[in-house]
Image (cartoon, rainbow, N blue to C red):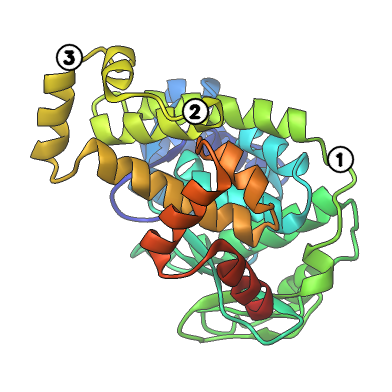
Amino acid sequence: MPGGNGTVIGSAARAVVETLRRYDIDGRAVARAAGVPPEVLDDPEARLASDTLDRFVAMAAEASGDPAFALAFAQQHRSISYHLYFAMAASDTLMDAWARVERYRHLVSDRLDVRRVPAPEGEVRFSFSVPEPEVGRWIPNDVLVATHVLGARGFTMDPDLAPLRIELRRPRPATIAAFEELFRCPLAFGRERLVVTWKASDVERPLPLANPAIAMQAEGVVVDYLAKLSDGDIPGRLRALLVRDLPDGLPGRDEVARRLGLSPRSLARSLAARGTTYRDIVDDVRRTLARDYLRAGASVTEITFLLGFSETSAFTRAFRRWTGQTPSAFAAAAKAAS
């Protein structure tokens, strides 16, 4: 739940209203006072300015009188992006689910950054970054990490699942009982980065609702939604189109232009004005997805198909050009880092 410029999915505001109901507070009244447009609360696809949501949550936390309001909010907030949530729940493992978060994080917020970072053998670490607003500075951090942990428990259907440790940017609160009750692991406050460390075996076990067909279907809806967000952003629309359609083969430039409602020349000019080309974007999308798939344990044959290559040798050559490594070497290094 980021601060500053940018937008978030509007149903986050509805989650704040639902959270305030626990405290017998009229959340819609607080939303009006915070400047949340009324229609945002009733439209699951609406977008809301990040700073407006920050203001709303800060006012809600103050109204509740609960120092741990952010943790209560996270319990409502974690399933607001329904199609992304379903795609994650139907993933093969938590690692696969979190790879989808990295890929589609802009659905929830275009200011959210989440990535896997190096860790000792037997561990997996995720680092989170989000702008911190002037009012309620630590709320976004608390919501992020709580959403991450609660989501892991929900996807695995294991209410006792807990990280190995959590490093929080926020200073130590006056009382940490609510944090200890929720996270159930060692906590370190006042750290430079927000980092959650898991046991590798916990995040690599199969999810009980794993279903590739459902995951792909839900992911398709996510891609379509992101494409609509990017209506005025030709590179963004092109990326969304490629992510969705690469498994059917790489579309030609003329076909892409037609589907974007442009002439091939207009597409080229639009991309050039933004300092990029069709080939640059194709390579970037394929490179990003290839890394995600390799980290998730997909085979070279599977990735060749998913990225629209005609044969594995073509994918291997492209991957070496992008990274200086073969896919197998990258996968081995990623596994060792986990």
Instruction: Work out whether 320 lies above or below 288.
Output: below
Instruction: Read off the residue under disc 1.
Output: 209
Q: Nearer the viewer, mark 1 or mark 2?
A: 2
Q: How many marks?
A: 3
Along the horizontal axis of the image, is 156 left or right of 171?
right
Residue 292 seen by the camera? yes
User: Which residue lies under the disc numbered 2?
Assistant: 249
Query: To which quarter of the image does residue 204 belong?
Result: bottom right
Q: Position of residue 304 (x, y in %)?
A: 57, 43
**In front here: 74 or 102?**
102
Q: Is residue 272 above or below residue 294?
A: above
Three-letter code for the amino acid on which mark 2 is drawn = Gly
Residue at mark 1 to residue at mark 2: CA–CA distance: 29 Å
Give the number of the disc on residue 263. Answer: 3
Amino acid type, callout 1? Leu
Horizontal relation, residue 124 to residue 228: left or right: right
* Frontmost residue, 273 versus 150: 273
Q: Residue at x 76, y 81 (%)?
A: 122
Label 2 residue SS: loop
The answer to which image quadrant residue 278 occupies is top left
**Disc 3 on helix, strand or loop?**
loop
